[in-house]
Amino acid sequence: MLLWPLISLMLQAFQVNQTSDPCEQLKKGKLKVNHGHSLQEFCNCALTSLHFQKVLNPIIPDCFQESLVELKIEQVELFTFPQQILGQKKLEKLSLKHTSLAYLPDEISTLSSLRELDLRGTSIVSLPDGLDHLEKIDLRLTSISKEDQDQMRTKYPKLKIFFSSPCNCD
C-alpha cells in the first residue's frame, strides 16, 4: 500500500528531470557519465569537463571539440586509444587511469594544450615522442621497469613523471 505513492513520486521526479534544460544538470560546466547516456543533448551547454566512469563505450560527440578542457575516462575496459580524443584541441587534462590501455598513439603529441596526463593503473610501458609540452604524467600503478623509468626521465627531463616504487619486472 505504501509502495504505490513511493513509485509514483519517483516517476514524477524522473519525468521532471527529463523535461528540464539539460544544461541545468551541469555543475560548473562539468558532467559525469556513469551509464549509457546521450551526450548530444549537452552540445549547447558550456561543457568544459567530461568524466566517464565504468562506461562500456565512451563516445565523445564532435560538438565538444571546442570546449573540453578536462576529460576523464576511468575504470573502463579500454583496449585502444579513443581517436575522438585527438580532436580535443583545447584539452589540458586527460585521465585514462584504470583502463586497459597498453600504448598511446604518436598523434597524442598534437594535443598542444595538453598539460597533464594521468595513466595510473594502465598497461602503458613506454611513451611516444613529442610530449615535451606536458607538465605532468602520472604512471603510478604501472609495470614500468626501473630501466624504462630512467629512460623516460632522460627523454623528458623537465617533465614531472610520477612512478610507484621501481618495478622489478622481468
Image: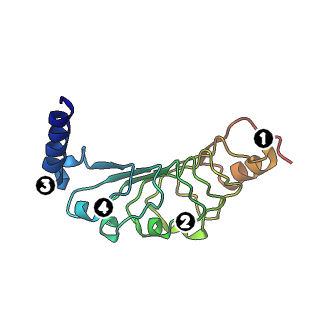
- Camera-side residue: 128 or 133? 128
Q: Are marks 4 and 3 in contact (CB under 8 Å)?
A: no
Q: Please state which amino acid type lies under the numbered disc 2.
A: Ser
- Give the x, y percent position of residue 85: 46, 65
Q: Earlier in the sequence, mark 4 or mark 3?
A: 3
Frontmost of labels 2 and 1 is 1
Q: What residue is shown with label 2?
A: 109
C-alpha distance separating marks 2 and 4 = 27 Å
Q: Earlier in the sequence, mark 1 or mark 3?
A: 3
Q: Are marks 1 and 4 in contact (CB under 8 Å)?
A: no
Q: Please state which amino acid type lies under the numbered disc 4.
A: Leu
Frontmost of labels 2 and 3 is 3
Frontmost of labels 2 and 4 is 4
Q: Earlier in the sequence, mark 2 or mark 3?
A: 3
Q: What residue is shown with label 1?
A: 167
Q: Earlier in the sequence, mark 2 or mark 4?
A: 4
Q: Please state which amino acid type lies under the numbered disc 3.
A: Thr
Q: Residue at the spot x=44%, y=68% of the render?
A: 84
- Give the x, y percent position of residue 141: 66, 41
Residue 53 as seen in the image, left or right of residue 145: left
Q: What residue is shown with label 3?
A: 19
Q: What residue is shown with label 4?
A: 39
